[in-house]
Every structure is written in C-alpha cells, then in structure tokens.
Image (tube, grey):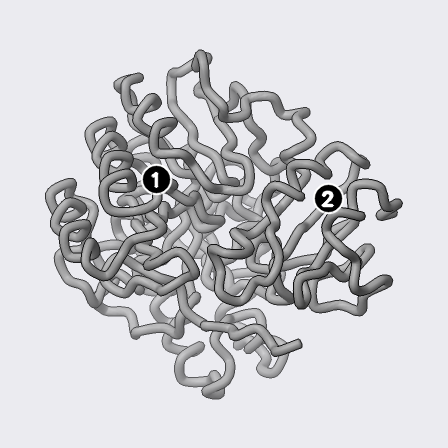
C-alpha cells in the first residue's frame, strides 16, 4: 500500500485543492456567519459551478466541491459579489480562525475576533494548517476543535492566550491579547524546525517560555449537540456534506446561519425547522459516526466511506470512524472502532486511530455489516 500524501495545507478560495471530483474551494465566513443572501448565493453557486454539495469542515468553514478549472474563475466572481472573499489574498491563509458560534455581537469573543482580524497583516505567514480559536464565554466549547493559539476564558473569568499543547496560558487584558498572540506566534516561527508545522508538535521538542504560561482555562462544557441550545437551533449535517437544496431552504428562514466546527449550522432565535433532512435530535446514532469523503471524491481513498458509515450507525454506543486512508482526516484521533481503507478493503482498529496497528486486515466492505466489530 502506498503511503497517503499529507498535503500539509488547507484549501482556500484563492488556493483551491484538486480532489477526485474536481477543485475544492473553501469559504471562510467572516465571524463564522453567512447571511440569508449569502446562503442562497452559495447554494446556487454549488449547483451551477460544483457538484451540488457544500462541505462543512471541522474548522467552521464551507467548501464547494467538484468545481472544474473552467468554472473556477466564474465561481470566484460569484463569491466576490457575495462579499465572501478577502480583499487581500495574502490574508486568507492567516484567517484560519475558529470563533465560538454562540457569541453575541460585540461581546468579548466577537471583539477579540475583530481585533485579531484587524491585526492579521502583522502576523507571519504560518505553515499550512496553523490556526487560532476564540472561545471566551463563561464555559469553553472549542476544547476539542483543532487550534494552535487559543484565546480563552481563564479559570478566574479573565482572558488567557494559550499555546495548544500547554495546560496553561498567560492572563492578559483585552487590550494586550492580540499583542500576546503575536509574540507567541513569533516565538513559534523562530523556534520551529522546518518539518514542524503545528504548535503541539513543537512543544513536544521545545519547552514553552514561562512568559506564555501560568493561568489555567475555565471549565469546559460538553460539545455542542444538535437541537435547541443557547437560544437557537443547531442542525447537524451527517459527515459534513450539505446538499445545496437544503442550504437554499434554510436561507428562506430569513436569519443568519452560524457555521460551527461540529458539522452543524446554528440559527439564533429559531425553534424548529420543518421538512429538513438535517438532524436536530441529539440521540441520533449517526452523530457518533465519522467519515471522510472517500472514493471517488478523494484521490487517496480506495474505498467508499459515507454510505457504509451510515449503514453501520447504531451498531454500538461508542464512536465509529470510517476513514478512506490512514490519514484520518475526518476524525484525527482515537475512536472505539476505526475502519481504515486499504487497497479496496478495510483494516479494523479498536480503541485507536487510523494510523495505529490493526486488529484485522483485508476486510471486504460487504462483510462489515455482519461482522462483530467490537
């Protein structure tokens, strides 16, 4: 089996990534929010220029898939008309920021986001997937969302800037927060070897200076689940691919949509949505299943993933991950049961990640529904 290629970077709008079904064009909504007009425009663009699906990513972004090279310039014109592109293309890769979707306008999290956005030109150009999270509510909700530099509520309900991989951060005032993040970013860039692209890996080799440590984060609430939460409605999109028609339907609600890092959309002030395929029931077993795009959408996958994942949902109470290859993009961590595609068959890993040692190998896809995977 050939080793999967780790791209080491995420697609953007100005830098799309070629996949098995065409270009993947990523949209990073400002403050994790799209207006009804933008939602309708994205849905129409996905149907006209892509394959009709919009991925929701674990960094609260949207991706239009299946875009041909001929359609790409027309798609970019459409996104520009919807005010969904950075004026300066160099800022797009720096604007890798996950903002808690439960902010209110001009609260602390939102103010810190705006302050960081204004200072992005001052930050160095980071390696591929390096990013920030801003999570300054009474309890933290983004603990399990990938980030490298975190703005968080402290245990004393102040603000800390924390390097991912270190248990504590440095307590700062609101006015000092972005400067401290810039100092931490500069330390990372000056200290890291060329082959280290993320903060946690660097901290396995280098001790973080004491000036960036000392104060612990606030308590963490459970990961947001679909249903009525925080004065709104969260609708989960199984495995992340949202049909354009579903997004168009939500745009008719005449309320902004917040894109969350949990493959879900949150709408403030909405109680229920009728006639939708999206999930509002937190007990739905599909929510315990993770699957990447798989074959034929990803050129590194040799197996189909999402239909199998849906078929296996509910077989047990734990987490299931169906991965097209050993990179584990959809769930890069340990799961109770992990199925890893390899040369058209699956390897079975229990209580591990896709790159861990398999308990069984060479399992045919059509036998998995009957197999005892535990």
Question: 47 or 337, which is in the foreground?
Answer: 47
In the picture shown, does residue 352 fall above or below 128?
A: above
In the image, taking residue 75 as reference, residue 278 lies left or right, namely right
| Crowd rating for badge 1 (residues with CA inside 10 Å; few <14, some 14–19, many 20+) | many
**Location of residue 34 by image quarter:** top left
Percent from the top left, x then y, of residue 188? 44, 77
Percent from the top left, x then y, of residue 280? 54, 22
Percent from the top left, x then y, of residue 183? 37, 71
In the image, taking residue 205 as reference, residue 347 lies left or right, namely right
Task: Determine whether the residue tagged by mark 1 lies in a helix, strand or loop.
Answer: loop
Question: 283 or 193, which is in the foreground?
Answer: 283
Q: Of discs 2 and 1, which sits in the foreground? A: 1
Residue at which label 2 appears = 319
Question: 292 or 151, which is in the foreground?
Answer: 292
Residue at which label 1 appears = 52
What residue lies at 78% left-to-right and 41% top-to-bottom?
Answer: 369
| Crowd rating for badge 2 (residues with CA inside 10 Å; few <14, some 14–19, many 20+) | some
Task: Determine whether the residue tagged by mark 2 lies in a helix, strand or loop.
Answer: loop
What residue lies at 62% left-to-right and 64% top-to-bottom?
Answer: 325
């Amino acid at each position: 089996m050939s080793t999967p290629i780790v791209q080491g970077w995420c697609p953007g709008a100005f830098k799309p990534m070629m996949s098995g079904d065409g270009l993947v064009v990523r949209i990073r909504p400002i403050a994790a929010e799209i207006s009804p007009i933008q939602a309708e425009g994205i849905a129409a663009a996905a149907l006209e220029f892509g394959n009709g699906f919009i991925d929701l990513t674990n960094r609260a972004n949207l991706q239009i898939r299946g875009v041909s090279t001929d359609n790409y310039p027309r798609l970019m014109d459409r996104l520009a008309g919807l005010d969904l592109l950075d004026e300066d293309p160099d800022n797009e890769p720096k604007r890798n920021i996950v903002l808690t979707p439960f902010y209110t306008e001009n609260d602390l999290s939102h103010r810190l986001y705006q302050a960081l956005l204004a200072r992005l030109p001052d930050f160095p150009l980071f390696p591929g997937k390096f990013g920030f999270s801003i999570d300054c509510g009474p309890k933290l909700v983004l603990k399990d969302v990938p980030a490298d530099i975190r703005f968080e509520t402290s245990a004393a309900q102040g603000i800390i800037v924390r390097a991912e991989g270190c248990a504590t951060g440095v307590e700062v005032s609101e006015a000092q927060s972005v400067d401290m993040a810039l100092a931490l970013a500069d330390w990372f860039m000056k200290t890291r070897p060329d082959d280290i692209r993320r903060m946690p890996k660097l901290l396995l080799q280098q001790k973080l200076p004491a000036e960036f440590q000392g104060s612990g984060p606030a308590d963490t609430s459970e990961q947001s689940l679909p249903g009525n939460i925080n004065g709104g409605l969260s609708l989960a999109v199984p495995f992340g691919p949202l049909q354009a028609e579903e997004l168009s339907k939500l745009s008719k609600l005449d309320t902004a949509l917040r894109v969350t890092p949990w493959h879900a959309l949150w709408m403030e002030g909405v109680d229920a949505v009728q006639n939708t395929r999206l999930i509002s029931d937190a007990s739905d077993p599909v929510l315990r299943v993770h699957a990447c795009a798989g074959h034929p959408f990803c050129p590194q996958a040799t197996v189909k993933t999402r239909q199998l994942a849906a078929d296996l949902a509910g077989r047990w109470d734990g987490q299931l991950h169906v991965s097209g290859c050993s990179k584990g993009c959809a769930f890069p961590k340990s799961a109770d049961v992990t199925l890893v595609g390899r040369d058209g068959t699956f390897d079975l890993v229990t209580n591990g990640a896709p790159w861990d040692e398999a308990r069984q190998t060479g399992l045919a896809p059509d036998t998995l529904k009957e197999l005892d995977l535990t």
